[in-house]
Amino acid sequence: MWQPKVSVGITVKNSAGTIFECIESIMKSSYPIHEIIVVDAFSTDGTWEILKSFGKRVHVFQKKGNVSVGRNEIIKKSKSELIAFTDADCIVNRFWLESLVAAFSEKNVVASGGFCGTSENSNYLQKLIGRELEDRFNHFPKYVSRFPFMNACVSAKLAKRNLIDERLGAAEDADFFFRFSKKGKVVYVPAAKISPNHRAELADFFRQQFTYGKYAPLMYSKYISMAGGDKISKTTMIAQPP
């Protein structure tokens, strides 16, 4: 049975409140992990010290730049056949990685992604955000054109030849996977579950949405046909850039 080596990659900046639990959940994986790579954008809140506390169990690096720069660093440093990504504020299910990897047993699969739910300890705003996100995932077909990087696994060899556009500080996942989907199948695996800690305060949520809107025009200019929505997003999302 094929059991590829897998790197798990996380980019982080000032996530001292969530990064320890995130990595702990990854380490409980039912699938053997070849390496965990974390790229920190010079955190100032104690995140770096928490990362260093894991010792040799986690490969940690510091690099200035946005999330795209950090993820490209993970891709370049990976010594595995597959690279799985999640975010610093996510808790992954024990069978998350095993489920993502299993999708690659199908012929011509270049990437897989899973379900993004809501943390059990969420407040009202977080549950509201999660409800909208979960509704989207509940309507995903088996084969899609893109995934959020917080729950995705990709062919390392192909990723090294098709790096993330570092001009994009958001919507970089859409751009990356649109290109990936032209190379082979991108498979949705509902059993690969994670629980993100959505923005807990309205101000943080609006800052996040502002960032998405800021980079959306650049992404849409590359894929104008996607501006009206696709199998994942709704047509109403075109209101996001304004």
Image (spheres, rainbow, N blue to C red):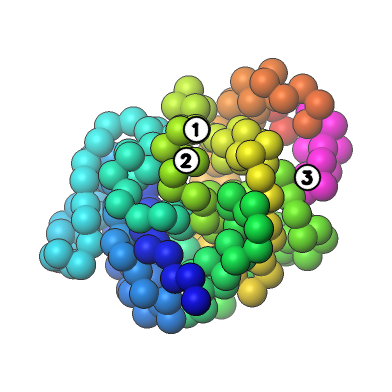
In the rendered image, the vertical position of residue 233 relative to residue 17, given as above or below: above
Residue at label 3?
233
How would you rate the neighbour count of disc 3 (Cα within 10 Å): few for under 14, some for 14-19, many for 20 or more? some
Q: Is residue 181 visible?
A: yes
Choose between 59 and 180: the one closer to the eye: 180
Residue 22 shown left or right of residue 180 in the figure: left
Quadrant position of residue 127: bottom right
x and y, in percent, of residue 19 in the image:
33, 62
Quadrant position of residue 189: bottom right
Q: Residue at x 68, y 69 (%)?
A: 190
Ranked by sequence position, the earlier of labels 1 and 3 is 1
Residue at label 1?
162
In the rendered image, the vertical position of residue 226 relative to residue 52, given as above or below: above
Choose between 33 and 49: the one closer to the eye: 33
Choose between 222 and 204: the one closer to the eye: 222
x and y, in percent, of residue 184 in the image:
66, 45
Q: Amino acid at mark 2?
A: Ala
Q: Is residue 198 visible?
A: no
- Per the image, label 3 sits on a secondary structure element best described as loop
Q: Which mark is residue 159?
A: 2
Give the magenta part as a residue range: 227-237
Q: Residue at x 37, y 33 (%)?
A: 69
Ranked by sequence position, the earlier of labels 2 and 3 is 2
Q: Amino acid at mark 1?
A: Asn
How would you rate the neighbour count of disc 2 (Cα within 10 Å): few for under 14, some for 14-19, many for 20 or more? some
